[in-house]
Image: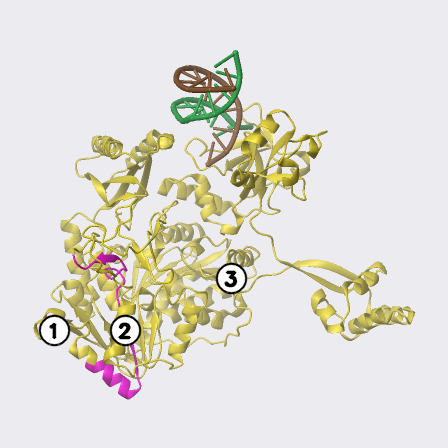
Chain colours: A yellow, B brown, C green
DNA sequence: AGCACGCCGACT
DNA sequence: GTCGGCGTGCTC
């Protein structure tokens, strides 16, 4: 076995296949599938993943692998296979699939440099080159680009004076600390100490320390403790009395926190009934998907915890997925509290280094439970016992760029491999999942009551049109105002929820209604208060707010704030004595700010918590007795077939924040469309009825879960090109599919232009189309090589955002 | 993606 | 006659 198949880090159609390389003798026993290697590729060096070892290759002129980047594989057999599965199921390049499964820190960085060719002196080169060399005798290409000396470099390289080199760099080093310990036994140490001459007082002290504390110690600590320097230690190492070594350490984001250990709670009869099938599947190593449908506050987390406990006792491992937004300290505490150091946490709040360290803990089997957002589904466990997906309906489980996977599908795929259960938990399951449970594809487990049989909060729906008619033009209905005042007097807490969308901070002329748009994209610019600039979220374009309206020259330009700011100001007017904590992108930008604000609220430092999406989840404070939703229908009118479902889920979710403990809770939902079923049924908290109503709508309009969707988006600088290509694609698909299948389009995308590229799309709705995958691949084969002509074709199977 | 190779226009 | 534009095709 001297040949390795390598998937190279070049994401194009043409290179999306294994390339064969010879393994140099020195690495023959080292290199294995799943390792990252550095390989020559054309004139440069790049990173690649070894997928296979073999003895023969169809290619004659094989080149050699430069070196391995790992000492042990970063992807095991199962994950390599999973990568292929991802590639097949999301139609992405293999390299994207592999990279998605690893922490970003393992992605290579490339650097191009030049160095002097053999026998050439710096001074042989023309000015200003001789003075531009770095310590290591190279000039960095990216710096040369900035200073405009690239042509000079190229000329010198052509003359053979300079040599171009390509480097692959690790993004990140393992963090290591130096440790020391005695290398001889305690009695010997005592003897040796006597022998140290009197003038080496510090060396004596060090040995005395080790006689008293006969164990390893971190070098830095030792030096601090004894007020000495490394030279003392070096002398003792020379004498073979001490040994020194490097040890890998982890950047533990939770290092300075203690977690109160908790024990399993007694389960209610309902919880007991719900957990039993899961434990049974655990016992029998049976793959099954459970849908744990439990109202807010019904104790789903305890079921997760005890199912995991059961796995750990069987020597297996567990993955828990939680939506990013709900990955709060509260959530982490519950898992760390129960399982202590056995838990790794993965979320976007961690630095690349911290994420890598958490991943290393998993890889080295130092933890058995990982709690994390979407990408934690790829945790490199090898003896998985259970996968839990909390808030299963959350759209953030779908990744929107390559590879466009849904964590739920990946979870089921992995669980099948390990023969273990998947538990999908939600108070408001996605229609897809609930439908599968109805069809007995998933097993339904219900928790219809709250713990201790607390009543669900009472919900009042306020018709804001009525308020307007009654002369109330404020954003607070009379009822909400009264109740807020009441809580203030009773010293209880309230949460006000504002749906961010519809209130986004665009800049508008009050006279003519002109909204400032991005010049490159057909979307309004977002106002950022911190920088007092307008920014495009799609292309990054920035600009200052004009003094005058570009259309009508009026100077009545104003921005519509993030909404929360406006609400805060308004609240200050009507309830001046209320202490308010505002949570939105502006106040939670800094690291840890989110956590601190919530802590303040929990500590009773404020009466009202005002915020967007981010407060809809996980809040569980005993003193909250009122929840207000300022405008329930802002997301209802988005061009998205899931908007009713999302509205219902959000309203139910938010309502669940109230009265989770002794005090009963009240919920006020303000809306302009109280008659809409998703608002009405969120009011009565009737998921089952909502499910039936929404399923009818989906059936009539040929949407999931009755039909599968595939979205094809084409973009190009020229509108004509986009239209004609999309038309050709749509035509080709129509010619290939059955007549039960619906092909919509071509139509302009909801955002018709991003970054000066026009966007057209085509939506396929189908029930059964076994050959669709092949058809789509043909399309990609045809058009992905046209990227040179500026054409982009992207395909999203089961899209969540139809934009 | 990069890069080399290759074929046409405007300069020393 | 050469320098350099970017169109095309290849990387084991």
Camera-side residue of A398 and A596: A596
Which residue was labeled with disc 3? A368
- Count of picture labels: 3
- Real-space CA distance between mark 1 and mark 2, rounded to the nearest whole angstrom: 20 Å
| Residue in the image at 32% along x and 51% along y | A536
Front tag of 1 and 3: 1
Report the side of A83 relative to A209 (left or right): left
**Dot 1: few (<14), some (14–19), or many (≥20) neighbours within 10 Å?**
some
Mark positioned earlier in the residue sequence (1 or 3): 3
Mark positioned earlier in the residue sequence (2 or 3): 3
Front tag of 1 and 2: 2
Quarter location, residue A622: bottom left
Residue A498, magenta (yes or no): yes
Is residue A782 among the parts visible in the rendering?
Answer: yes
- Residues in magenta? A482-511
Q: Which mark is residue A467?
A: 1
Report the side of A247 relative to A143 (left or right): right
Q: Position of residue A192 (x, y in %)?
A: 88, 68
Q: Which mark is residue A550?
A: none
- Real-space CA distance between mark 2 and mark 3, rounded to the nearest whole angstrom: 48 Å
Which residue was labeled with disc 2? A569
């Amino acid at each position: 076995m001297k040949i390795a198949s390598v998937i190279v880090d070049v994401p194009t159609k043409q290179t999306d296949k294994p390339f064969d390389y010879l393994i140099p003798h020195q690495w023959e026993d080292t290199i294995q599938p799943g390792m990252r290697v550095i390989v020559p590729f054309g004139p440069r060096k790049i990173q690649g993943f070894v997928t296979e070892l073999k003895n023969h290759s169809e290619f004659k002129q094989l080149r050699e692998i430069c070196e391995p980047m790992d000492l042990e594989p970063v992807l095991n057999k199962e994950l390599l296979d999973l990568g292929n599965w991802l590639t097949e199921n999301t139609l992405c390049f293999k390299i994207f699939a592999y990279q998605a499964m690893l922490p970003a820190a393992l992605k290579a960085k490339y650097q191009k440099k030049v160095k002097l060719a053999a026998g050439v002196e710096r001074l042989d080169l023309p000015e200003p080159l001789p003075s531009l060399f770095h310590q290591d005798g190279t000039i960095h290409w990216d710096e040369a680009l900035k200073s405009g000396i690239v042509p000079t470099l190229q000329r010198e390289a052509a003359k053979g004076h300079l040599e171009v080199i390509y480097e692959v760099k690790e993004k990140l080093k393992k963090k290591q600390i130096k440790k020391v310990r005695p290398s001889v036994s305690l009695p010997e140490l005592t003897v040796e100490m006597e022998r140290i001459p009197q003038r080496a007082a510090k060396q004596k002290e060090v040995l005395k320390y080790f006689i008293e504390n006969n164990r390893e110690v971190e070098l830095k600590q030792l030096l601090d403790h004894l007020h000495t320097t490394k030279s003392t230690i070096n002398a003792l190492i020379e004498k073979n009395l001490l040994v020194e070594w490097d040890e890998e350490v982890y950047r533990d984001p939770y290092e300075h926190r203690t977690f109160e250990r908790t024990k399993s709670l007694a389960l209610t009869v309902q919880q007991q009934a719900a957990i039993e099938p899961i434990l049974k599947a655990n016992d029998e190593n049976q793959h099954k998907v459970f849908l744990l449908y439990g109202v807010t506050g019904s104790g789903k987390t305890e079921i997760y915890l005890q199912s995991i406990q059961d796995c750990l006792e069987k020597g297996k491992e567990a993955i828990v997925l939680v939506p990013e937004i709900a990955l709060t300290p509260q959530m982490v505490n519950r898992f760390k509290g129960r399982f202590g150091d056995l838990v790794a946490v993965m979320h976007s709040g961690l630095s690349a280094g911290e994420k890598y360290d958490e991943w290393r803990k998993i890889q080295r089997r130092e933890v058995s439970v990982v709690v994390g957002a979407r990408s934690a589904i790829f945790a490199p466990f090898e003896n998985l016992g259970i996968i839990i997906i909390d808030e299963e309906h959350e759209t953030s489980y779908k990744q929107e760029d390559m590879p466009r996977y849904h964590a739920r599908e990946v979870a089921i795929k992995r669980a099948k491999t390990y023969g273990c259960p998947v538990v999908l938990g939600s108070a408001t399951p996605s229609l897809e999942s609930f439908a599968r449970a109805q069809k007995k594809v998933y097993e339904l487990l219900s928790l219809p009551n709250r713990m201790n049989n607390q009543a669900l909060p009472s919900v009042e729906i306020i018709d804001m049109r009525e308020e307007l008619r009654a002369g109330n033009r404020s954003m607070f209905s009379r009822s909400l105002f009264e109740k807020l005042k009441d809580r203030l007097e009773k010293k209880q807490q309230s949460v006000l929820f504002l749906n961010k969308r519809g209130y986004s901070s665009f800049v508008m002329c009050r006279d003519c209604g002109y909204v400032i748009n991005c010049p490159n994209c057909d979307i309004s610019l977002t106002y950022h208060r911190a920088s007092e600039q307008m920014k495009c979220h799609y292309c990054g374009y920035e600009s200052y707010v004009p003094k005058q309206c570009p259309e009508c020259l009026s100077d009545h330009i104003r921005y519509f704030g993030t909404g929360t700011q406006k609400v805060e100001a308004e609240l200050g007017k009507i309830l001046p004595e209320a202490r308010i904590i505002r949570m939105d992108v502006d106040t939670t930008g800094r690291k840890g700010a989110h956590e601190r604000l919530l802590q303040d609220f929990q500590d009773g430092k404020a009466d009202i918590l005002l915020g967007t999406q981010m407060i809809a989840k996980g809040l569980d404070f005993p003193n909250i007795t009122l929840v207000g939703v300022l405008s329930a229908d802002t997301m209802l009118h988005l061009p998205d077939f899931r908007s009713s479902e999302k509205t219902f889920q959000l309203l139910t979710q938010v309502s669940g924040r109230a009265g989770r403990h002794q005090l009963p809770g009240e919920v006020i939902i303000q809306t302009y469309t109280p008659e809409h079923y998703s608002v009405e049924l969120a009011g009565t908290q009737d998921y089952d009825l909502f499910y039936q109503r929404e399923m009818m709508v989906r059936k009539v309009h040929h949407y999931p879960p009755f039909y599968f969707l595939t979205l094809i988006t084409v973009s190009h600088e020229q509108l004509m090109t986009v239209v004609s290509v999309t038309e050709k694609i749509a035509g080709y698909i129509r010619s290939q599919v059955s007549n039960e299948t619906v092909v919509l389009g071509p139509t302009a995308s909801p955002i018709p232009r991003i970054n000066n590229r026009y966007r057209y799309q085509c939506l396929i709705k189908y029930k059964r189309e076994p050959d669709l995958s092949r058809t789509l691949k043909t399309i990609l084969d045809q058009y992905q090589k046209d990227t040179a002509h500026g054409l982009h074709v992207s395909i999203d199977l089961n899209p969540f955002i139809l934009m």
